Amino acid sequence: MIRLRVNDEHRELEVEPRRTLVEALRLDLGLTGAKEACGMGNCGACTVHLDGEVVRSCVTPVRRAAGRAITTIEGLSPDGSHPLQRAWCELAVPQCGFCQAGQIMTAAALLAQNPKPKDADIDHSMAGNLCRCGTYGRIRAAIKRAAGMPEE
Amino acid sequence: MPLTRRQFVGGLALSFVAGRAFADEPTGASPGKPKVADATEKAQAKGLKANVFVHVAPDGQATIVCHRSEMGQGVRSTIPALLADELGADPLRIRIEQADGDKRYGDQNTDGSNSIRGEFEELRQAAATARTMLVAAAAKRWKVSPGALIARDHAVWNGTHKLGFGELADAAGKLPVPKPEAVKLRPRSELRHVFKPLPLVDGPAIVNGSAQFGADVKLPGMLIAAIARPPVVGGKVARYDAKQALAVPGVKQVIEMPQPKAPYAFQPWGGIAVLAENTWAAMRGRAALEIEWDNGPNATYDSDAYRQALSASVHAPGTPARNVGDVDGALAKAAKVIEAEYHVPHLAHVSMEPPAALARYSDGACEVWACTQNPQDAQKEAARVLGIGEDKVTCHVTFLGGAFGRKSKADFVSEAAFLARAAKRPVRVQWSRDDDLHHDYYNAVNTQLLTAGLDPAGKVIAWRQRTAFPPIGSTFSPTRRPSAGDLQQGVTDLPLAIPNVRAETCEAEAHVRIGWLRSVYNIFHAFSWGSFVDEIAQARKADPRDVLLEIVGPPRIVSLLELGVSQLRNYGAPLDKHPIDTARLRNVIDRVTQAARWSDRGGRALGLAAHRSFLTYVAVVASVVKSGSGRIAVDEVWLACDAGTIVNLERARAQMEGAVLFGMSHAFYGGATMKGGVTEQTTFRDYRLVRMGQAPRRIHVDLVTSEGPPGGIGEPGVPPVAPAIANAVFALTGERIRQLPLMRAGIV
């Protein structure tokens, strides 16, 4: 039995502790917002927060999350109103959308630590999140908008 | 009853409803996701349903079906808005429903940048038919001529009097459906919502994590399958032992897949499937399989050796594909001959979402949920694998996490269908990134030899293009020659104001499955001719823009006679409606070079390329710099696009921005290479994509305003990007790039 705190709810899971966190979230808890796209921590689509820190849940065994607070895209805000989620919609950032939960979770951790990031900070923090559709320019702009900074 | 998600992001005036991605029984929804039971479905029996696309319920709810797949191009934000506008509906009262595979929708293959360009008028016709019936019902009620009435804002108006669509729906539904010739499309001036930036209807569902993709759908009792597929195309299992795999906790079954026969088309790939309670167990079980493969004849496929074979192929005369004048004679008497060989390797799709499909089978019927671009082909392939009628297969379409042509191949869906019956349980087939890279339908590898003859003044008097690539046709029948449809993509359709032109195709045998990838053969043909024009300019010490405009020639409609072909497929469009118009190509070249201040570029290293594809004209200027580490970086890109009428300016702009990054990834890193018939790349570490820090600081997209018939949007931005970058690299470093990716030259 593994006890987790997911999006402020206590959850108990009877799972093989070496299984990945991303699949425990997706298959066992029904939180499918985090995606698995590479299985090796190379692309960031599975990004969630563990005690506020960014983790790649596809290479995180579920046992490592035991007793810790997990935040997924579903728990980032109660109604999709986090400043990043709003900025993402206002600037129509997503194309296919598959990587965007991971992008937003990484950006949320960045802004939590660095409320006014410089371009280089954004590039550095977001370097682990791939987007095949090529939404990077709008992601940068949306992060700045959410941070209340000029977008250019 | 369908699941309908009504999600409103605080502060946003988006009231479009994210439609149903699938029927309600499967669950993937988290407790946090609202499931709003919807009365609309019940009401659907009533009201007006003139055709499969539009329904108006007695409560006024208008439901519009999106019959094409959403894969990032924004089709769900575009087609329903167009139909709503033609209907006269209030865009805020539209419910969007995602279509299952069903021939009644016509072609659903979301491919070829065709959703708007191919069906702009047909789709409006569907909505206009419903509007005509609503107007007729109102005319009957008021006892006036329908000609005096106007449908707008969800009502039919007679002066200042109105009857809401809901009030009219039942009466309209009882009227006969008018003949097509009795239905008039609105004049453009009456379409008040489209031809502008439109809201992104699925944005809220994407940013809160509720949008459901291929692997997000779940059925009770479902098993997850990981398949060990033959590592070489045409290979098969010689022997296997499943004991270790079955010993992995969670693994339930091991099933041998059917062996495909050439031509492979969309058949399952063969191999051994491991079915488990979860993906982790399935993947571990697969790793524990002991399999001895018989790799077959394609195990000799080696990309380095093959490249030499392609080079030899283009150094011998091929089969003429277009011919004007006397190229050999002109080359013989030319004052100067320039020749260059270009090479682009196989490219992989690597959509962020690897293929995934869920199927269940019972009583001779199969139901699938898949991230497919082509649900009707998915039905067909599943039916073929199961030996049942296509009408016995239901295909629900989820969101697609990128597709780019890969997901119009139904192989992964037919794998799931086969396994669901064999396992007697619902089965989700889950591809890993490694599977996706190893078992792709790759874009063709290509080598070209371009030869130009110049007169003493430097004017090009002869142009010869030889191209060799294993054609997509080889996936469907044994062929080594491209089709006319292949050659229209940058060979037979190039507008060249040159008196002697010949294009030849040279043989190339396929050793992997070849497929179409966003803009397809245009990628390498645009790279070659875009680079070669720059080489000619360099040889003449002339400005590349001036030479490009000279070679494209004066504004004109290019005839078949001038092209030197007897016919041109022209992306399925009639030439009188969509001619090759050099004025439009020149215009995007002019606009993009003005925007980039080409004539005033000072020390900036700029590269230019232009290309027509999918009936759309695009020109790109790239600016490159050397970063602190001495590597090449693209710092700014300008793109001008003339796609004729654009329904959704906002998503068109997004597609062009995305095309720049897509083309940049090809240019920098693109390349799937094979050794011993096996693809060498396995992860995002060795099949690299451009990352955030490499994205240009600015991408300027200029969309030409036009009322011409619509061209494609999804693909045509891609082809000019790589040659523009390569030409900019030359401007910066003097190094001519004749093969992609740039990574191979060690400069990125």
Image (spheres, coloured by chain):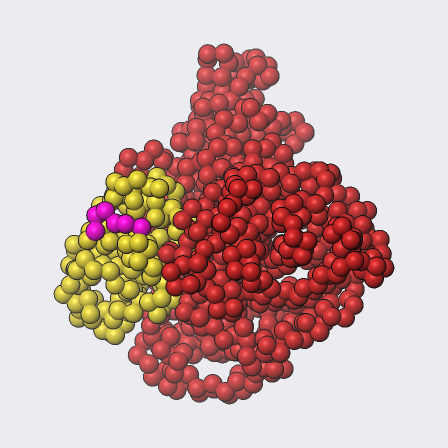
Q: Nearer the viewer, residue B78 or B159?
A: B78
Q: Nearer the viewer, residue B488 or B633?
A: B633
| Chain (red) | B
Question: Left or right: B417 with respect to B312?
Answer: left
Give the residue displayed 79% in from the left and 47% down from the top.
Answer: B562
Q: Position of residue B386 (x, y in %)?
A: 55, 67
| Residue at position x 25%, y 40% in the image | A148
Picture colour for chain A = yellow
Q: Residue at x 17, y 60 (%)?
A: A51
| Residue B709 located within the stretch drawn in magenta | no
Left or right: residue A136 compared with residue B437: left
Quarter of the view holding residue A16: bottom left
Which of the 4 image quadrants contains residue B238?
Answer: bottom right
B725 above or below A15?
A: above
The residue located at (48%, 29%) in the rendering is B193
**Magenta span dominant secondary structure:** loop
> Magenta residues?
A114-119
B12 with respect to B733 (left or right):
left
